[in-house]
Image (tube, coloured by chain):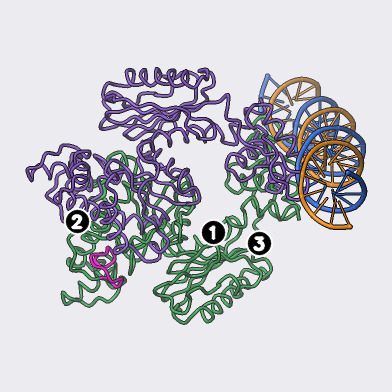
Chain colours: A purple, B green, C orange, D blue
DNA sequence: CGCCTTTGTTCGATCCTCGGCGGAAGTTGG
DNA sequence: CCAACTTCCGCCGAGGATCGAACAAAGGCG
């Protein structure tokens, strides 16, 4: 049955979170006796989960032996599958990236082809860092569409033909596989890397489309059907003429997404097909592109203003392809949010660009895998085995 | 230190939730030995928290003794403070209402006056049911404004002059007091009474203003500053001429709140000052009022459509004064939400009127108090004392 | 009326945790 | 340089808590 708080799993959680680095810290934090803590730590060391390093600084007496996660022997993978790319990051148990790779890959080729590619890349990366396949403990995968998280099956994803209801985890045999929406894993990665203290965070990805990952009480909020955060089809005022691929009109994505901006630029005679082209034009100083990006920021801000009132986050992070010109995007977003949201909600709100950048999704997916492995229940299972 | 899962507190949680009604159930659910369970239950009985009732039906052997919460000896209060009223409900530990009362009371009179009134009503109700003041274990209070939940202090409430930062719990001396926004406690009450199985629920109160209580993963989501759910000032399209008391224009509340509808009706020459007047006109069959309520439903639906995409709830409950004409309000809301939200999010979504009715807030506040008292940590503290 | 099933209690065996003790390893002060 | 002090850590016996077997209680079934 479920063991004590102060179990081996809880002890490891404190160590991995950095809340405790010595046996004394652990005793103070858990309230357990020093001898009990020692016994727990011994078990964790025996299983290769924790290692002792050289003595730390003395505080007037014998210096404590430092404890930290044992970063050899284990490996974790974070996979970022986009519409046209595949990134794989190999990480150790502390979240440090050991190796990574990226290549073009069309997700429309279907699950067998794509997952075979991922599998081969995994072997390659493991080889490069000299760890055996058996060291791989868990894999996190972010995909560009809704997923039933509990089973790892994509749920009617619009841009992933052939993936509907495909049981992704089964493809990898015994290893634990966690599949989630790409925006969710980006939110997770950003939160753990840049804002670990924030209890409520929104990660807004502005790329071809627009999506949002939600961290509530430090954990991902996926909603009842796993479709939470799909803000691309929220209505914005004053654009009823803009039709959206979803069938409605005036969707945020249809007026402020990268594809929408590119379309409007090409109507103005400029050559732009994708969000990347928009970024290039802005960076080249094109005033039309700049104006449209700013305007998109205001529209996104209008939607976010409502969500700030509703959800009351303390951080909003802007990521995705268009965040490469974030100074212009953010100007519009901030302007609208701070004007249209309630003072109580905006008083301690900060709106910032993503710090994790291009690898946000792969890192977040890896973190998803690591946190699953490090969950107290799982660790207790391992230790008591 | 923190005790075992399977502690007395956990055992009581299972009993109060109805998950277990016999010692055998408890043994199965917790995995503890029968003898251990017996010892836990004995401790709970000794403290007056659990009682044994007559034997249940045999399943082929000795019939088990039924266990349930001991509903004597303890009492809990739920208080609903509105702008112009005060309702107090006295409940036993199972959530059953023992006695209640309601009177007009202006919250603007300030905390001392209002809380003295509440205190006197509490004594009165306790007297009526014949329980001593000492039996009162905890008080939950819902107030019409934002609250810093951890301290029980109202946070710049717009319609509660004199209450800003007032330490409400201290007024009641030793008893535990929990203060929260009225919409939050209504959401809690509705969830526990009508939709205990739903993991994500929104309770929308449509009265003079418009607010929303959020249940995520079965618990209240209050946000970073405790202001989550304030949807009354989200912008709706096509009403930029409607000014709001918050300083912005086109706020949902300024076009679809009870006060706004009443104002528009009086512009049409009808006599309406408040949401109650609107309800009366609709019930009298006035077509103008009916049209405006339906239109308000569509506007509320527009905002909710966005929130459904973002939050992905499985239930939306409509409450508040205007829900007394909910058939008309709901028609507009459903129409818009099912048209403007994503199919994945609406597929299992149900939108229903409140079932708890006028006493929703007082009941919810009482439940807040009861759940606080029944929390495993608190029970363990009591049992180990 | 015996036998079976299920429930509940009692009690000794076992396992876990606690905390004191002593040794280890450093700092401080003379 | 050494003694006294502080902190850290392993060892071990004492004290609890939990377990499970044995037994008693209470009803169903043939």
Magenta-span inclusion, residue A148: no
The quadrant of the image that shows the N terminus of chain A is: top right
Callout 1 and callout 3 share a chain? yes
**Predominant secondary structure, magenta span:** loop
Callout 1 and callout 2 share a chain? no
| Marked residue chain, label 1 | B
Task: Find the distance from the CA under tag 1 to the CA under tag 2.
Answer: 39 Å
Residue B241 left/right relative to A29: left
Return the residue at label 3: B74
For image coordinates 74% across by 41% down, the residue present is: B38
Q: Nearer the viewer, residue B111 or B136?
A: B111
Which of the marked residues, 1 or 3, is nearer the chain's N terminus?
Answer: 3
Return the residue at label 1: B368
Residue A200 location, x and y as percent? 44, 51
Q: Nearer the viewer, residue A234 or A329?
A: A329
The quadrant of the image that shows the C terminus of chain A is: top right
Q: Nearer the viewer, residue B225 or B369?
A: B225
For image coordinates 27% across by 76% down, the residue present is: B273
Residue A15 left/right relative to D8: left
Asked if marks 3 and 2 touch (Cβ < 8 Å), the reply is no
Residue C29 left/right relative to B173: right
Q: Secondary structure at mark 2?
A: loop
Magenta-span inclusion, residue B253: yes
């Amino acid at each position: 049955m479920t063991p004590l708080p102060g179990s081996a799993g809880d002890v490891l959680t404190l160590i991995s979170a950095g809340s405790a680095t010595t046996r004394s810290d652990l005793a103070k934090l858990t309230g357990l006796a020093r001898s009990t803590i020692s016994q727990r730590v011994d078990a964790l060391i025996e299983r290769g989960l924790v290692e002792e390093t050289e003595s730390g600084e003395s505080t007037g007496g014998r210096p404590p032996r430092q404890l930290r996660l044992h970063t050899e022997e284990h490996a974790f993978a974070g996979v970022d599958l986009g519409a046209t790319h595949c990134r794989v990051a190999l990480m150790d148990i502390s979240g440090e990236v050991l190796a990574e790779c990226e290549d073009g890959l069309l997700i429309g080729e279907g699950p067998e082809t794509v997952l075979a590619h991922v599998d081969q890349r995994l072997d390659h990366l493991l080889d490069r860092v000299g760890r055996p396949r058996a060291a791989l403990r868990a894999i996190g995968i972010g995909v560009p569409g809704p997923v039933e998280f509990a089973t790892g099956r994509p749920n009617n994803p619009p841009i992933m033909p052939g993936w509907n209801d495909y049981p992704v985890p089964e493809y990898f045999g015994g290893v634990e596989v966690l599949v989630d929406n790409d925006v969710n894993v980006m939110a997770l990665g950003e939160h753990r890397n840049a804002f670990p203290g924030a209890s409520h965070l929104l990660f807004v990805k502005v790329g071809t489309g627009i999506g949002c990952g939600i961290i509530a009480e430090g954990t991902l909020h996926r909603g009842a059907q796993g479709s939470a955060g799909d803000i691309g089809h929220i209505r914005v005022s004053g654009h009823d003429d803009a039709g959206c691929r979803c069938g409605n009109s005036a969707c945020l994505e249809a007026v402020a997404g990268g594809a929408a901006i590119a379309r409007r630029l090409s109507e103005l005679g400029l050559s732009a097909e994708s969000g990347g082209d928009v970024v290039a034009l802005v960076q080249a100083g094109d005033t039309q592109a700049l104006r449209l990006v700013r305007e998109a920021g205001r529209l996104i801000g209008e939607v976010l203003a409502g969500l700030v009132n509703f959800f009351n986050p303390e951080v909003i992070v802007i990521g995705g392809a268009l965040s490469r010109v974030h100074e212009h995007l953010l100007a519009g977003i901030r302007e609208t949010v701070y004007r249209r949201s309630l003072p109580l909600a905006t008083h301690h709100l900060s709106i910032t660009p993503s710090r994790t950048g291009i690898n946000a999704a792969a890192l977040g997916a890896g973190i998803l895998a690591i946190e699953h492995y490090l969950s107290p229940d799982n660790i207790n299972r391992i230790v008591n085995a």
